[in-house]
Image (spheres, rainbow, N blue to C red):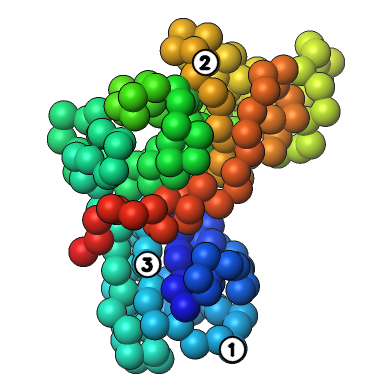
Amino acid sequence: MILNIDVGNSYAKWRLEDAGLVVSRGTQSSQSIVEQQKLKLSTHHSFDEARLSLVGQDDIAGILRKQFADDHGIELKSAMVSSVVGGITCGYRDPMSLGVDRWLAVVAAYTRFEQSLVVVDAGSATTLDIVNSDGCHQGGYILPGLELMRKSLWQGTENVKARSSGIVSLSPANCTEDAVNRGSMLALISVIAQTVDKFSGRLVVTGGNASLIKKMSILPADHIPELVIDGLGVNGVSFK
């Protein structure tokens, strides 16, 4: 069995697979891994391989390496960005400067659809990556996620304060909190729509805010919640 782990800025997700079939999965906050010095695995199954996608928080890699070595006798493999995986080519001048989560999402999405794509990972930050029909990654964009947009207004203004709340509409708001939440979502959706229109790509969304983006946008989108984990299993992905 293989354990695949995706650790982002806010949350960590894991999925245990046996010959391509999901045996179990789980999630926890990334910070809790640091606090508890372990990834909580709610499974009694044994596994003989563990693969990791990690952005930031290098201390987590050390924690997990020690956990799997001590508890399972396994060396943790960390995914790396490379110039080429199968038919997908990285568009960054320095491939190693691209976030590995973005790369794995691109690799997984193109492997699945094999057409021009706009891949959106909507988490703490929102990333957009463009892939043409030949599998060439064209680069992308990074902008704040919804929570960061709210925090920037909270910290940078005297009276524009808003907490996260359910966004049910993008119509003009009649209170400050709704105005901030709807404005942030409208800005995000507008950037995505413009990118899809400019590059004529199929929209694929993942990340914590992906379902909300799909709900609020009029654009058709494929929501794939574990896209980065899917990328860990693509043949040709490099590990260290």
Q: CA distance from mark 3 to mark 1?
A: 18 Å
Using the image as rendered, state which of residue 92 and residue 200 is in the foreground: 200
Residue 105 image point, x, y percent: 43, 42
* Badge 2: residue crowd in 10 Å (few <14, some 14–19, many ≥20): many
Q: Residues within 10 Å of mark 3 (few under 14, many from 20)?
A: many
Mark 3, secondary structure of its residue: strand
Say whether residue 163 is left or right of residue 83: right
| Residue at left offset 73%, top offset 25% | 216
- Marks 3/1 in contact by CB < 8 Å: the verdict is no
- Most extreme residue toward the left is 94
Q: Amino acid at mark 1?
A: His
Question: Which residue is at 64% across, 28% downward?
Answer: 221
Q: Which residue is mark 2?
A: 196
| Residue at 32% in and 47% down | 100
Compared across the picture, whether 61 is left or right of 165 comes to left
Q: Can you identify the residue that label 3 sits on?
A: 51
User: Where is mark 1, residue-wise?
Assistant: 44
> Is label 3 in contact with label 2 (beta carbons under 8 Å)?
no
Q: Give the Cα separation between the discs numbered 2 and 1.
A: 43 Å
**What distance separates the C-alpha of mark 3 from that of mark 2?**
32 Å
Secondary structure, mark 1, is: loop
Answer above or below: position of 105 versus 20: above
* Figure quadrant of residue 206: top right
Instruction: Inspect this view and state whether residue 111 appears.
Output: yes
